[in-house]
Image: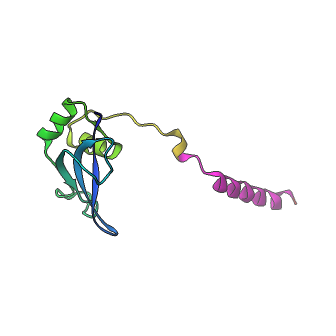
């Protein structure tokens, strides 16, 4: 059974509140989980202590059992000092999409046209 430490969404529409849970990876996002490890409230200020709360001992236990954190939870664990910081590289993040590339090409052509006259 592959285990995940992930976020389970709660709260009402446009007012999210997440639980940090340990669950089987085959279960639905908001479905059955084995243990609630903490909470995450994205509506609070980033420097607020109540934004992310988690039980560090239980998180360490689940990591020792082979549970894999999702990307967002991994960032929380890195910030809390529970896991080592991972190097991330997304070279395509700064590359514009097709539509933006076409607009830039047209803009460059328009800028070059008056210079030729």
The prevailing secondary structure element of the residues shown in magenta is helix
Residue toward you, 114 or 78: 78
Q: Which quadrant of the figure has residue 16? A: bottom left
Q: Which quadrant of the figure has residue 63? A: top left
Q: Is residue 67 magenta?
A: no
Rendered location of residue 45, percent (x, y): 25, 62
Residue ID at (20%, 37%): 82
**In the shown orientation, is residue 57 left or right of residue 32?**
left
Q: Which quadrant of the figure has residue 83? A: top left
For the record, the magenta segment spans: 94-116
Residue toward you, 4 or 89: 4
Residue ID at (64%, 56%): 100
Q: How is the image coloured?
A: rainbow
Residue toward you, 114 or 29: 29
Q: Is residue 15 above or below residue 75?
A: below
Q: Quadrant of the C terminus?
A: bottom right
Rendered location of residue 60, percent (x, y): 17, 35
Q: Is residue 16 above or below residue 90?
A: below
Residue ID at (54%, 42%): 92
Residue ID at (28%, 33%): 1
Q: Is residue 39 above or below residue 3?
A: below
**In the shown orientation, is residue 18 left or right of residue 87?**
left
Rendered location of residue 104, percent (x, y): 68, 55
């Amino acid at each position: 059974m592959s285990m995940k430490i992930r976020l389970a969404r709660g709260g009402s529409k446009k007012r999210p509140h997440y639980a940090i849970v340990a669950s089987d990876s085959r279960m639905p996002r908001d479905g059955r989980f084995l243990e609630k490890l903490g909470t995450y409230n994205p509506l609070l200020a980033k420097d607020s202590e109540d934004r992310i709360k988690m039980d560090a001992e239980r998180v360490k236990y689940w990591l020792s059992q082979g549970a894999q954190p999702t990307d967002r939870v991994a960032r929380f664990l890195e910030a809390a000092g529970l896991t080592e910081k991972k190097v991330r590289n997304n070279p395509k993040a700064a590359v514009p999409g097709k539509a933006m590339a076409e607009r830039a090409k047209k803009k460059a052509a328009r800028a070059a046209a008056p210079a030729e006259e």
